[in-house]
Image (tube, helix red, strand yellow):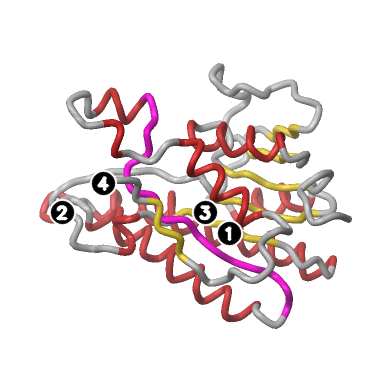
């Protein structure tokens, strides 16, 4: 195969979200076949590629359930790259965080990333593929002095960063490159609605984030592994 994504099979978790749609679109432009697990029985109405010939939607996939994650990855043939965008955000003062809320944040961000990385790496090792793993941590996961209310979210994203570096080190002799991007505020419709008075020009565009993720997942990335790429825009 060439050093492009043409014809290569790529998993994109969280692919039906705002960033996910941008990433899937970028990968399709580069010729990839995109496998998108969806937690629901049908794709959301805003997903722009429900009938694209190179998009494979899989429904009712709970990414926190190891059996469902393993079954989903087993259905993907010739896996080249796995991109893990699925996650969530919550903010609260530490004294108000309930244990269940903390556990939910760890499940949503760290556990899903671990389970998908594990399944993808198993597939790549079994197929002797020099593949690519791309995770999403966050600025709050690298800089834990980003303000109040970030204990649960920051801890979950710091775990993603730590796993990324540890996996890259473990796999460096096996040809699988593992990296993560660390966005600051992404310019999405939901974020604009939440912060209408903010200066949107300082935020990271979905196009810019998708471009960075697609590069890390591509065969053109020959050497970057264990890297936590800051996507901070002008914030």
Q: In the rendered structure, which disc, 3 or 4, sits on the residue that comes first in sequence?
A: 3
Q: How many marks?
A: 4
Inter-mark Cα distance, 2 to 3: 25 Å
Inter-mark Cα distance, 1 to 4: 32 Å
Q: What residue is rendered at 54% in x and 40% in y?
A: 14
> What label sits on residue 147 in the rendered view?
2
The magenta-colored residue range is 174-189
Instruction: State which mark lies toward you, 2 or 3.
Output: 2
Q: State the residue position of label 1.
A: 115
Label 2–label 1 contact, CB within 8 A:
no
Q: In the rendered structure, which disc, 2 or 1, sits on the residue that comes first in sequence?
A: 1
Q: State the residue position of label 3.
A: 112
Q: Is residue 168 magenta?
A: no
Label 1–label 3 contact, CB within 8 A:
yes
Label 2–label 3 contact, CB within 8 A:
no
Inter-mark Cα distance, 3 to 4: 28 Å
Inter-mark Cα distance, 1 to 3: 5 Å
> What label sits on residue 235 in the rendered view?
4
Instruction: State which mark lies toward you, 4 or 2.
Output: 4
Q: What residue is rendered at 65% in x and 55% in y?
A: 217
- Crowding at dot 2, Cα within 10 Å, few <14 / some 14-19 / many 20+, comes out as few
Query: Going by the image, does 228 lie left or right of 132?
Result: left
């Amino acid at each position: 195969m060439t050093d492009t994504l043409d014809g290569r099979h790529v998993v994109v978790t969280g692919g039906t979200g705002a960033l996910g749609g941008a990433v899937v679109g970028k990968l399709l432009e580069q010729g990839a076949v995109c496998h998108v697990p969806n937690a629901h029985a049908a794709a959301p109405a805003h997903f722009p590629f429900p009938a694209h010939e190179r998009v494979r939607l899989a429904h009712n996939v709970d990414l926190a359930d190891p059996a469902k994650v393993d079954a989903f990855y087993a259905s993907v043939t010739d896996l080249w790259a796995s991109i893990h965008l699925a996650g969530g955000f919550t903010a609260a003062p530490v004294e108000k965080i309930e244990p269940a809320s903390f556990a939910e944040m760890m499940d949503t961000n760290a556990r899903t990333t671990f389970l998908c990385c594990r399944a993808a790496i198993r597939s790549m090792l079994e197929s002797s593929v020099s593949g690519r793993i791309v995770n999403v941590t966050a600025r709050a996961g690298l800089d834990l002095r980003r303000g109040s209310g970030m204990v649960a979210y920051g801890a979950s994203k710091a775990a993603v960063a730590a796993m990324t570096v540890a996996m890259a080190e473990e796999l460096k002799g096996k040809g699988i490159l593992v990296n993560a991007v660390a966005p600051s505020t992404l310019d999405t419709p939901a974020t604009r609605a939440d912060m209408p008075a903010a200066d949107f020009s300082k935020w990271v565009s979905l196009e810019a984030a998708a471009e960075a993720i697609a590069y890390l997942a591509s065969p053109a990335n020959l050497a970057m592994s264990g890297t936590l790429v800051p996507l901070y825009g002008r914030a």
